[in-house]
Image (cartoon, rainbow, N blue to C red):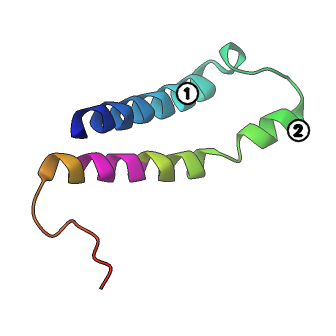
Amino acid sequence: MRRPIRVMLVVAILIDVAYWTIWFTDRPVLASGTTDAYYQFENAFPLADAWLGLACLLALIALIDRRPGWTCSTA
């Protein structure tokens, strides 16, 4: 069951990086509007998406590492 999760994490990271790379290099490819409000709205998300990418990366590392001690206990 780990393999599909690893694949989904890698895909999420790649989509996140690809989206923001395109957004900052060739904005008209992705933009569905051209108003300043639309650009301000979209520019509010890079930090949140970077956090998402970091969380996915750390989850991927944890899945690959498989060291004991990465379990959650409900004591």
Q: Is residue 11 left or right of residue 48?
A: left
At label 1, which amino acid type do we have? Answer: Tyr
Q: Which residue, given by chain and number where applicable, does mark 2 sit on?
A: 37
Q: Quadrant of residue 11?
A: top left
Task: Give the spatial CA distance, label 2 vs label 1.
Answer: 19 Å
> Relative to 44, is 20 above or below?
above
User: Seen from this angle, which residue lies furthest left?
Assistant: 67
Towards the viewer: 65 or 15: 65
Q: Quadrant of the C terminus?
A: bottom left
Q: Residues within 10 Å of mark 1 (few under 14, many from 20)?
A: some
Q: Amino acid at mark 2?
A: Ala
- Residue 17 spot, x, y in % from top left: 46, 32
Q: Is residue 57 magenta?
A: yes
Q: Which residue is mark 1?
A: 19
Residue at coordinates 70% horizontally, 42% vertically from top-left?
43
Position of 7 compared to 55: left or right?
left
Which of the 4 image quadrants contains residue 6?
top left
Name the residue nearer the viewer: 73 or 8: 73
Q: Is residue 51 above or below residue 73?
A: above
